[in-house]
Amino acid sequence: MRRIRIFDTTLRDGEQAAGGALTFDEKLEIARQLERLGVDCIEAGFPATSPGDFRAVEAVCEFVKDCQVAALSDAKLPNIETTAKALMKAKAPRLHTVLSTSDIHLNYQLRITRDHALDMAVAAVKLGRSFLPEVEFSAMDAARSDREYLCRVFEATIAAGATVINIPDSVGYMQPHEFADLVAYVMSHVPNIDKAKVSVHCHNDLGLATALSLAAVREGAEWVECTVNGVGERAGNAALEEIVMAIKTRADAFDCETGIKTEQLWRTSRMVASYMGFPVQLNKAIVGGNAFAHASGLHQDGMLKDRITYEIMTPDSIGRTDSRLVISKHSGRNAFRDRLKALGYELDDDEFMRAFRAFKEIADKKKDVTDGDVEAVVADQVLVVAETFRLDRLQVSCGEPSIPTATVLITVADGTVMQDAATGSGPVEAACNAIDRIVNLPIKLVEFTVHSASSGSDAIGEVSVKVESAAEGTFVGRGASTDIIVASARAYLNAINKVVTAGREREAGHGRRAAPFAVLASPAVNA
């Protein structure tokens, strides 16, 4: 069967989603999971936007060995050179350069002629090939470009050395049959198309990104660019899990396959949702909480008789299980390590001990510990940002008609112990207000999300918060506990500690992406 290659751009286009910034360590952890998932190429970032993004791309290149690593650049020659430098340590690097080809973009955004744009594209590809053996050229807004001109640009960039040409629907404008026709047109009207691979990159503005991508696959596209959970600009990108499972489930319709280890999809989805602070909607295809839930009596009757009546795929096929641990508070390290391994986690000794201690605390409080509980514990304990502020004690008082009050005791990194109290409209706000009185930072809490890691009244609550700092940008904080108020306070302090760490790195000269909107201004990032 024909092999469709998966180009994952969660760390680049996905991170450009408003409020979706990731820390350095979170990027590396997601890259490791994407490699475990089996993607063919990871687009790690946009190195020319900041020293922080350069450093993150460089680190992913050193970290990842079993798949390609790509990085994006606009067509400005200095940025091509910067991007190539960031990719130098990759085992299999790909420089991805992009330039608009639609008259809408050329006239109203870039304000250059078609000939000027063609010359820029060719120069960018030539310079990229002088550094690296593989260069991809993306024609931004190809879906709204003049087809003859689009083919001229593709022909010229392939002649200049492009090994992959990308046909994006950058604004999610087309219908599936139109996009299929465009891909077929390009493949039949670019004379040297046989010297390059054809890739597609679709956005979800009309909810059609997956359909557009699959239509292109049927026309012969060899690469599909997508993101986990469909995260990305505006309404997002084509969702990796939807494309992969559509091809796997309907191999008869597509006559092709991917190299994705689908049993890793559930864990990958949960990791990206947790780290980016973007909860997955319950009715989301493949990885939504209700994707395998059957409420109708008619459906339940069919499922009881034979699962094939209403399930075209199984939860196990995407790695989703609701199994309970056979270990308890009396279990030792080896049993816990074996369970982590079965769930796909590879922790070093320090990470393991943090997770094990947290597991013991949870096991003391819960009768049954589920895989979801363990995943929540690992997410809460493994990626521990430098703790400038540590929550040591939290006490709340609330009810009706009393005024919600919280008292917190926090230890600062220098050993100072600080205590304060505050009121709020509820216990969570009271706890956050008390923390604010101690840390005294100009930040704003903009989002608060809570969900259960498992079922039952004693389930672990996972809290995700987003905070905004005018100086450092947007950060996601996470916390987990059987006490939702404690989880909320931990999540808020986790985000605050990220703000403090980012400020120190910036002052030290490492830099980071200042804020999502600063990146959106670049003409290259919508590819």
Image (spheres, rainbow, N blue to C red):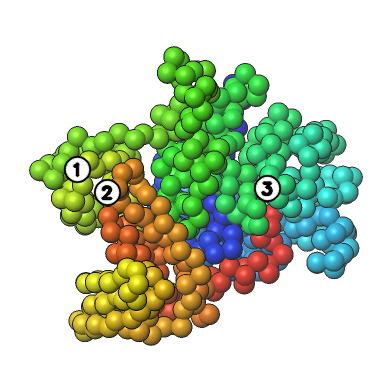
According to the image, label 2 marks what residue?
Answer: 458
Residue at point 41% right, 29% down?
Answer: 316
In which quadrant will I find the C terminus?
bottom right
Nearer to me, 517 or 311: 311
Total label count? 3
Residue 269 is at least partly visible in this image: yes
Q: Which mark is residue 261?
A: none
Determine which residue is flagged by label 3: 204
Residue 157 visible here: no
CA distance separating discs 1 and 2: 8 Å
Tell me if residue 503 comes above or below residue 317 in the rendering. below
Name which residue lies at 62% across and 64% down. 81
**Residue flagged by tag 2: what amino acid is it?**
Asp
Task: Give the mark, 2 or 3, whose residue is nearer the N terminus.
Answer: 3
Residue 216 horizontal/vertical position (percent): 72, 35
Q: Is residue 401 above or below residue 144?
A: below
Q: Name the amino acid, label 3.
A: Asn
Q: Which residue is mark 1?
A: 367
| Residue type at tag 1 | Lys
Element type where label 2 sits in the image? loop
- Label 3 environment density (alpha carbons within 10 Å; few <14, some 14–19, many ≥20): many
Badge 1 vs badge 2, beta-carbon distance below 8 Å: yes
Q: Residues within 10 Å of mark 1 (few under 14, many from 20)?
A: few
